[in-house]
Amino acid sequence: MPVKNVTRNTIIASRSKIADSALGRAVGLMFSKPTQAAMVLKFAKETPISLHTFFVFFPIDIILADSALRVVGIVKGMPPFSTYSADQKAKFVVEVPSGTRAKSKTRVGDRLTFLRIVEKRFANGRRITVSRA
């Protein structure tokens, strides 16, 4: 699922996994490689967020978003084997390799969206359609 910054018209992650269960959120990016790393943590409601990077062997950027998908907080370059407790409440957390936030120019107040890629095949080839999730 691609993650897009609608305000800046930039792609934050071209592919990501979603974790909407307690176990999935606890595992997060553990043991993943930086080239495969993009995770969206989804919570049932806006809540104060606490995160860890245990067994994540590279620094990550964290983007916190509320239920309206507005960015409410950003953590730049969270080092491996550390913890973080947010002051603000969030419903979505986007975890990406360090530097990704800067490349996408994402800032607090920006609006995000999640995209869905629908692939349709035709006799003469392939057509890919991207739409909002």
Image (spheres, grey):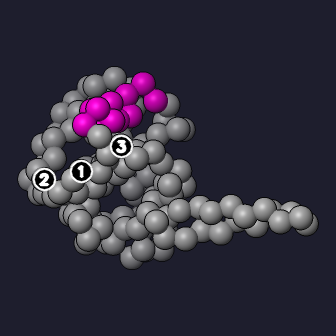
| Residue visible at 12% across and 43% down in the picture | 85
Left or right, 93 with respect to 83, comes to right
User: Mark 2 is on which residue type?
Assistant: Thr
Q: Are marks 2 and 1 in contact (CB under 8 Å)?
A: yes
* Residue 24, above or below 133: above
User: Mark 1 is on which residue type?
Assistant: Phe
Is residue 43 a member of the stretch shown in magenta? no
Q: Earlier in the sequence, mark 3 or mark 2?
A: 3
Is residue 33 in sight in this rendering?
Answer: yes
Q: Mark number for residue 19?
A: 3
* Residue 108, above or below 19: below
- Gap between marks 2 and 1, in whole Å? 8 Å
Give SS at disc 3: strand
Can you identify the residue that label 2 sits on? Answer: 47
Can you identify the residue that label 1 sits on? Answer: 43
Is residue 28 a member of the stretch shown in magenta? yes
Give SS at disc 1: strand
Quarter assignment of residue 72 = bottom left
User: Mark 3 is on which residue type?
Assistant: Ala
Q: Extreme right residue here?
A: 124
Residue bounds of the magenta highlight: 22-32
Indicate the position of residue 120 as horizontal and vertical percent values. Answer: 72, 64
Q: Earlier in the sequence, mark 3 or mark 1?
A: 3
Indicate the position of residue 39 as horizontal and vertical percent values. Answer: 40, 45
Mark 2 is surrounded, within 10 Å at the Cα level, by few (under 14), some (14 to 19) or many (20 or more) other residues, namely some
* Residue 51, above or below 10: above
The image shows a total of numbered marks equal to 3
Give SS at disc 2: strand
- Gap between marks 3 and 2, in whole Å? 16 Å
